[in-house]
Structure formats: C-alpha cells, structure tokens
Image: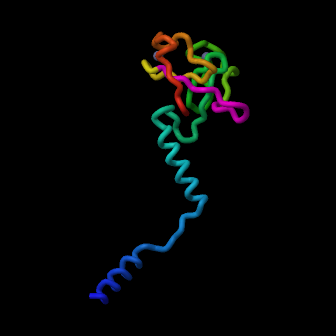
C-alpha cells in the first residue's frame, strides 16, 4: 500500500517538470491578459497605434491617422498618438447610445454621431 502510494506519487512528480516562471515571463503574461481585456473595448488590434484628433477628441485605431477627421474635418496634422508619450492622458468618454469614443477634457455636449446629449456619456477607462 505504502509502496503503491510512493510509486504513484513519484510518477505524478515525474510528469510535472520543475520549472519556475521567470518574472519577465509573468510580466508578459500579464500584459497579454490586459491587451485581451482591452481589445473589444477600443477595437485596438495588436500593434495598431491609436490616433486622437486634437480638435474634437475623435479616436481611431489604424496604421496612420486619417487624412481628414470624419467628425470635425480637421486635417491629418491635427492628429496625435494616444495616449501621448508625455504629459497627462485625457479622460476617454464613451457615448452609451452608439459607442462613440472621444478623448477630451469633458464629454461633448452632443454626440457627433447619434446626437445623444452629454448626459448619455460615461467615462471609459482605456
Ligand atoms: Zn476631429
Ligand atoms: Zn452617440
């Protein structure tokens, strides 16, 4: 009996390679989890930068900033990467009606997409 248990135990132990995950590896796993959690929310694909229109706060995740902002018609040079590499990040607002996202000091008075009023916006953690 004792013999069997010992053999069984030894067998199980033999199947589990002794391996301690490196702290670096854990960091990577954590980052991957965070990425996955964010993916549906901001439609951010891995490696795609997020661009913010400095005029209206419009956010777009794509290879390059749009030539013209679809919301306020500002030109491409009015776009910056978001969140900015330096300086404080602006809060992101989400229209609860249509899902429109804008990064700016305060939510827009009226949603440029669906015309919902400011009280239909909520702060959205990116
Ligand atoms: Zn704009
Ligand atoms: Zn809306």
- The quadrant of the picture occupied by the C terminus is top right
Q: Residue furthest front?
A: 2
Q: Residue 74, position in %: x, y?
A: 64, 15
Q: Is residue 66 above or below residue 22?
A: above
Identity of the residue drawn at 54% across and 23% down: 93
Magenta region: 82-95
State which quadrant residue 72 falls in: top right
* Percent x, y of residue 86: 73, 34
Q: Residue 122 or 78: which is nearer the viewer?
A: 122
Location of the N terminus by quadrant is bottom left
Task: Say if the magenta span includes residue 85.
Answer: yes
Query: 51 or 7, which is in the foreground?
Result: 7
Residue 17 at what x, y percent from top left?
46, 73
Residue that sits furthest to the left in the current view: 1
- Please check the rendered image and state whether residue 45 is part of the magenta-colored stretch, yes or no: no
Outermost residue, right direction?
A: 86
Residue depicted at 58% across the width and 41% down the height: 47
Front residue of this view, candidates 35 and 120 = 120
In which quadrant of this rendering is ligand 1 seen?
Answer: top right
- At a point 47% along the width and 41% down the height, the residue shown is 37
Q: What secondary structure is the stretch in magenta mostly built from?
A: loop
Q: Whole-percent x and y of residue 106? A: 60, 18
Colour scheme in the image? rainbow
Which image quarter: residue 104? top right
- Residue drawn at (29%, 86%) of the image: 4
Q: How many numbered discs, if any? A: 0
């Amino acid at each position: 009996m004792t013999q069997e248990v010992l053999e069984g135990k030894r067998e199980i132990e033999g199947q589990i390679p002794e391996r301690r995950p490196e702290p670096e590896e854990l960091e990577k796993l954590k980052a991957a989890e965070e990425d996955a959690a964010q993916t549906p929310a901001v439609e951010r694909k891995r490696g795609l930068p997020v661009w913010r229109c400095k005029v209206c706060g419009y956010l777009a995740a794509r290879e390059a900033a749009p030539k013209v902002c679809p919301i306020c018609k500002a030109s491409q040079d009015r776009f910056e990467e978001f969140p900015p590499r330096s300086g404080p990040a602006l809060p992101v607002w989400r229209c609860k009606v249509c899902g429109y996202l804008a990064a700016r000091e305060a939510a827009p008075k009226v949603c440029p997409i669906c015309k919902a009023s400011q009280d239909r916006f909520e702060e959205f953690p990116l």
